[in-house]
Amino acid sequence: MKKRQEISVQTIINADAAKVWEYYTDPGHITRWNFASDDWYCPRAVNDLKAGGKYTARMEAKDGSAGFDFEAVYDEIIDGKKIVYTIADGRKVTITFEEAGDKTKTTTLFEAENENPVAMQQQGWQAILDNFKTYTETH
């Protein structure tokens, strides 16, 4: 079986690691930032943040034309530092949180899927991470 290409996206958030972790993992916050563009939204999220726990986020176009459930199972959680999960289609994702004073570097490394161009996937995941940065810094 061919190994999937890995893609990395990252940002530096002007907030301490505790706030970044809370905003990244709390479903009440997830629904406010987890979308790549303003014409989509995340009406619900469920997050059982433990190894073997399940994460589900509903993603929908605001005009009702499309929607899907993003589902994953957690493989590893290091509180405040690292999240590793497997998406329902078998791809692995690792998210790290590195505190640097009053800022936090957040990096997501994910395996590419085979349906869309790599650049498109990277742009989409980066857009979601950028939304997260903006939300966290302004709330």
Image (cartoon, grey):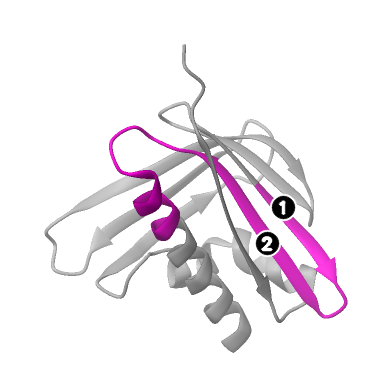
Q: Magenta residues?
A: 95-124
Q: Residue at x 75, y 70 (%)?
A: 104
Vertical relation: 75 (above or below) 102: above
Q: Is residue 99 left or right of residue 139?
A: right
**Marks 2 and 1, how far apart at CA:** 6 Å
Q: Residue at x 53, y 61 (%)?
A: 27
| Residue 87 in sight in this render | yes
Q: Residues within 10 Å of mark 2 (few under 14, many from 20)?
A: many
The amino acid beneath tag 2 is Thr
Count of numbered tags: 2
Where does residue 116 sit, x and y in percent of width and height?
Answer: 29, 42
Closest to the observer, 116 or 66: 116
Q: Is residue 61 left or right of residue 132?
A: left
The amino acid beneath tag 1 is Thr
Q: Earlier in the sequence, mark 2 or mark 1?
A: 1
Give me the disc on residue 106.
2
| Residue 139 in sight in this render | no
Q: Is residue 49 left or right of residue 60?
A: right
Q: Secondary structure at mark 2?
A: strand
Vertical relation: 21 (above or below) 50: below
Give me the disc on residue 26.
none
Choose top left, top right, bottom left or bottom right for residue 94. Answer: top right
Vertical relation: 32 (above or below) 1: below
Q: Residues within 10 Å of mark 1 (few under 14, many from 20)?
A: some
Residue farthest along the right direction in this orientation: 101
Residue farthest along the bottom direction in this orientation: 138
Task: Tell me whether circle 2 and circle 1 mark residues in contact (CB < 8 Å).
Answer: yes
Task: Please tell me whether residue 105 belongs to the stretch shown in magenta.
Answer: yes
Where does residue 127 sit, x and y in percent of width and height?
Answer: 44, 66
Where does residue 6 sit, x and y in percent of width and height?
Answer: 54, 38
Identify the residue under disc 1: 96
